[in-house]
Amino acid sequence: MIVKPLLICAVLSSSITLSLSLSLNFLAFTGYGCDTKAVIDILAHRDATQRAYIQHEYRTMYSKELLKRLSSELSGRLEDAVLLWMHDPAGRDAEVIRKTLVMDQNLEAATEVICSRAPSQIQYLRQVYYSKFGVVLEQDIEMMTSGDHKRMLLRYVSTPRYEGPEVSREIAEKDAKVLYKAGEKRFGTDEKTFIQIFSERSRPQLNATNSCYHELYGHSLKKAIKKETSGNFCYALLTTVRCAENPGKFFAKVLRKAMKGFGTDDSTLIRVIVTRTEFDMQYIKAEYVKKYKKTLNDAVHSETSGNYRAFLLSLLGPNE
């Protein structure tokens, strides 16, 4: 049996800063196989800038790509999670969308990523997507989706939106009335109106519309969406309004669904934990324990095992 040599890992010195001039200490693990615990301890506690620097230095010192080495040393769900983590946030989103949209044709997962991202994130994602795969994001959306779902995603990724906190009550009330007339008040649904408003309004503005809708008609905009639309188009609209209202609550629900019942949806577990750790995981954890009376750490611990469990728990941080 041929035993693979140990992975040589790069680790930042104890005086960690974001400066690329930071000195590095390189630890060579001797013996047979890979010291997976050391890999987890090092990589799970490095931010995107530090991970990029580690990969750069590894390439410089050993003339090899760290990602390829990690892939050869790790396996299974741990490999999936670590390799996704090694990208920067936009790179991760690009990898997830490409895989779920084109390879797996998991349109719900691709929709979740696209419709939960802010406009500035989407614009950078589009650049990274093209640089990685040589195709514009809109082209893959055009090929792999259809109908109102396709029209919603295309408008969402191509329409510039305001990201500030200011809200117009007048516009919110007007949009609520327009959406009511386009949906519940008429026979059939005017999907174009939903697409236009949901793709053009900022998150705070859309959340204000949601509140106005409830005040005017006695129930939430989300309930109206569920009544008037279906399938992936419905999920795109719901994801957009839920993330406008409370993204932490939305992702807590996604994680709960991934771990509820028999078996675990590890792809979703990895996707959400890895992509949200550097953004809003503390809010997701708070919403999870509030709604489900159990910490997210405890839930993940009960649904996973081994080094895969250790890596996800390291990303989640303290059990609170």
Image: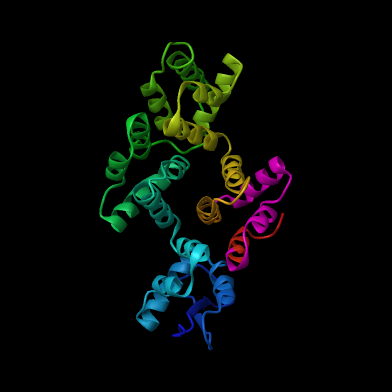
Res. 2 image quadrant: bottom left
Q: Position of residue 33 (x, y in %)?
A: 51, 82
Measured along the vertical axis of the image, is residue 74 above or below residue 116?
below
Magenta segment's dominant SS is helix
Q: Residue at x 34, y 34 (%)?
A: 150
Q: Give coordinates of residue 202: x percent, y percent.
A: 46, 33
Residue 201 in sight: no
Q: Is residue 34 rendered magenta in the image? A: no
Queried whether the magenta region covers residue 284, the answer comes back as yes
Q: Is residue 11 visible?
A: yes
Q: Quadrant of the C terminus?
A: bottom right
Spot the residue most to the right.
293
The quadrant in which residue 115 appears is top left
Spot occupied by residue 22 in the image (x, y as percentages of width and height): 49, 75
Residue, x 49% and y 15% (percent of image)?
184
Q: What quarter of the picture does the N terminus occupy?
A: bottom left
Q: Nearer the viewer, residue 166 or 98?
A: 98
Report the span colored magenta: 279-308
Name the residue rendered at 63%, 51% in the picture: 282
Depth check: give the residue in front, 234 or 212.
234
